[in-house]
Structure formats: structure tokens, C-alpha cells
Amino acid sequence: MKEIQEFAKQFHKEMNWEISNESFEEARASLLNNYMLLTTEVAEVAEELRKAFNMTRTLVHEGMEEGKAFEMSKDFIKEDIGKELADCLAYMLKFYNYFGLDLEETFYAKMEEVKNRRNKDVVPAKK
């Protein structure tokens, strides 16, 4: 994760896509713009999912078994959803780097926090 974070830092710098830190107003505008761009990319992930769900429904309606139809639909969107998820990651890395956060450290710390929550949403095992 450290390598990808450093790559993103250098890439954003080369492309002149870093979040501005010139002044409060510029930083604020840049942060909000990048947040808006991130949410746009998240919406594009949703569009790919919608495409897969609609394709699955159509294939099932045409007589294909549901599991096979869904697998075919996932394969159909795989490349495009990968691109959209990569876009999301690039914007997230931009925020990590702007705030001087270590992606790997914060990820594992958060997962440990989630693991140790008392009010976990746990589905009981079927008997």
C-alpha cells in the first residue's frame, strides 16, 4: 500500500492535480472539488452495478439460470467497474496524501476498531 500511495503522490504532482494548500480559501475549494469528483466516481461504480443487475434480470427473463446470469453480468462489467474503482482510489489517495495519512496504518487500525466493536451487525449462523 505504501508503494501505491507514493506512486499516487508523485503522479498527482506530475499531473498538477494536487489539492491546493496555498490559502484556506484555495484549500477549501480544492478539497470540495476533489470530494465532488470522488463522489462522481462512486456514482459511476453504482452505474456499473446497475448495469450488471439489469443485465442479470434480462438474462433470467430470457431463461438463463440466475447464478449463471449474474456471473456473466459481473464478467461483462469487470473491466469498467475496475476503472471506476481505480478512479475512486486515486481520489482517496489524494486525500490521504493531503492530510499526511498513512493508508496502510489507518486501514489496519480501522479494521481492528471494527473487529472489536461491541454492537457488531452479526447474522447468526444457520443451523
Image (tube, rainbow, N blue to C red):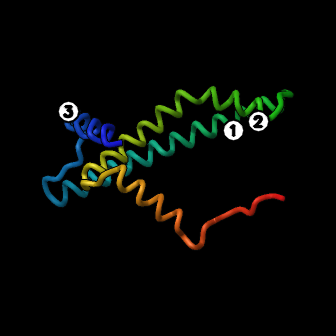
Q: Is residue 46 above or below residue 55?
A: below
Write down the quadrant of residue 13 in the picture.
top left
Q: Residues within 10 Å of mark 3 (few under 14, many from 20)?
A: few
Q: Between label 3 and label 2, give the one nearer the viewer.
A: 3
Residue on which the image places disc 1: 53
Residue 36 percent across, percent down from the top left: 38, 50
| Residue at x-position 51% and y-position 63% | 114
Answer with left or right where residue 49 lies relative to residue 66: left
Residue at image coords 51%, 40%: 44
Provide the residue designation for mark 3.
14
Q: In the figure, is residue 15 to the left or right of 22?
A: right
The label on residue 57 is 2
Question: Nearer the observer, disc 1 or disc 3?
Answer: 3
Q: Amino acid at mark 2?
A: Arg
Locate residue 26, reporting x and y percent.
Answer: 19, 54
Q: Nearer the viewer, residue 97 or 64?
A: 97
User: What is the CA distance from the residue labelled 1 to the residue labelled 3?
Assistant: 38 Å
- Observer-nearest residue: 100 or 79? 100
